[in-house]
Image: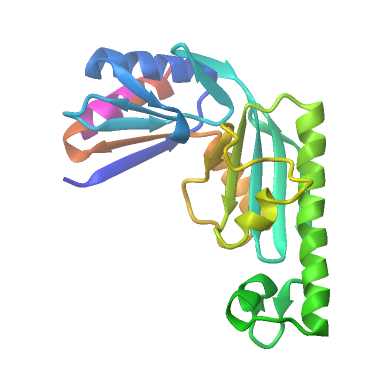
Amino acid sequence: MDEQSILKTYDDEQLEHLLENLHDQYGSSEYLSSKHLLTFSEKHSVSIRLPFCFTYLNEKLIPSNFLIILIHSGEAALAYSEEDQIVEHKMVKAYMVRQKQGKSQIKYLKTRGKSKAGSRVRLAGTDHFFGEINEKIAEWDEYFEIEKIAISCNKTLQPYFFNRPDAALRKDDDRLFKIPKHIQEANFENLTALHNYLISMELKFYDSDNELINTIISEIDNE
């Protein structure tokens, strides 16, 4: 059977109505906090990735604030969202790429060993890059109530982000969620597109449930 998905942006009343209908049709659900995901009956394999602008607590939806962190070699895009609106954002860039090879200095050092003068300049840029990212995250975390943090950062860069003496976040922070899709570049366009994705609910189901799911969705859309 093929899996299908529906991506929708709903307010709290619509989303609560959707969950009620899914519970009526499929029975109890299980919440997987690491993925912000509700799954319904094993037989039907229906699941819903809840919007990041809501916290799911004691089977209730509570409006919440969250961060988005996109980190690539030499570029980062950060945003603070209050419920479903980006309130603040920051773009960070650094000189981290060796021009001829197009490879980040961090990755180069893992394969080539000692660095020369140009490499040291690039490494200094790397340190400033991650320092600026951590400074902004720490500032937001101090002034705002942040319930969730959506992050995209490849494994090569993670130690430079999480293991700094001034790290704003630790890798085991229970607010962290790995962004469930590939992000090509850490730019403002992708940041806003990802925000729109994260404040939407994503309902996944198989062909056998297509008619029922679409009936439920149509009822809510026509309210």
Relative to the observer, which residue lies in front, 150 or 53? 150
Residue 154 sits inside the magenta stretch:
no
Indicate whether 188 appears above or below 63. below
Q: Quadrant of the C terminus?
A: top left
Relative to the observer, which residue lies in front, 206 or 153? 153
**Rendered location of residue 220, percent (x, y):** 40, 20
- Using residue 15 as the reference point, say whether residue 29 is left or right of it: left
Indicate whether 166 appears above or below 17. below
Where on the picture, by quarter, is residue 183?
Answer: bottom right
Say whether residue 44 is visible. Answer: yes
**Rendered location of residue 144, percent (x, y):** 77, 27
Q: Quadrant of the N terminus?
A: top left
Identify the residue at image location x=30%, y=15%. 23
**Rendered location of residue 191, percent (x, y):** 64, 49
Indicate whether 204 appears above or below 192. above
Q: As drawn, which residue projects farthest toward the bottom?
A: 100
Identify the residue at image location x=64%, y=41%. 170
Relative to the observer, which residue lies in front, 14 or 163? 163
Secondary structure predominantly adopted by residues drawn in magenta = helix
Identify the residue at image location x=65%, y=81%. 113
Indicate whether 4 appears above or below 156. above
**Rendered location of residue 118, percent (x, y):** 81, 82
- Using residue 116 as the reference point, say whether residue 1 is left or right of it: left
Say whether residue 188 is visible. Answer: no
Residue range highlighted in magenta:
210-216
Where on the picture, by quarter, is residue 112?
Answer: bottom right
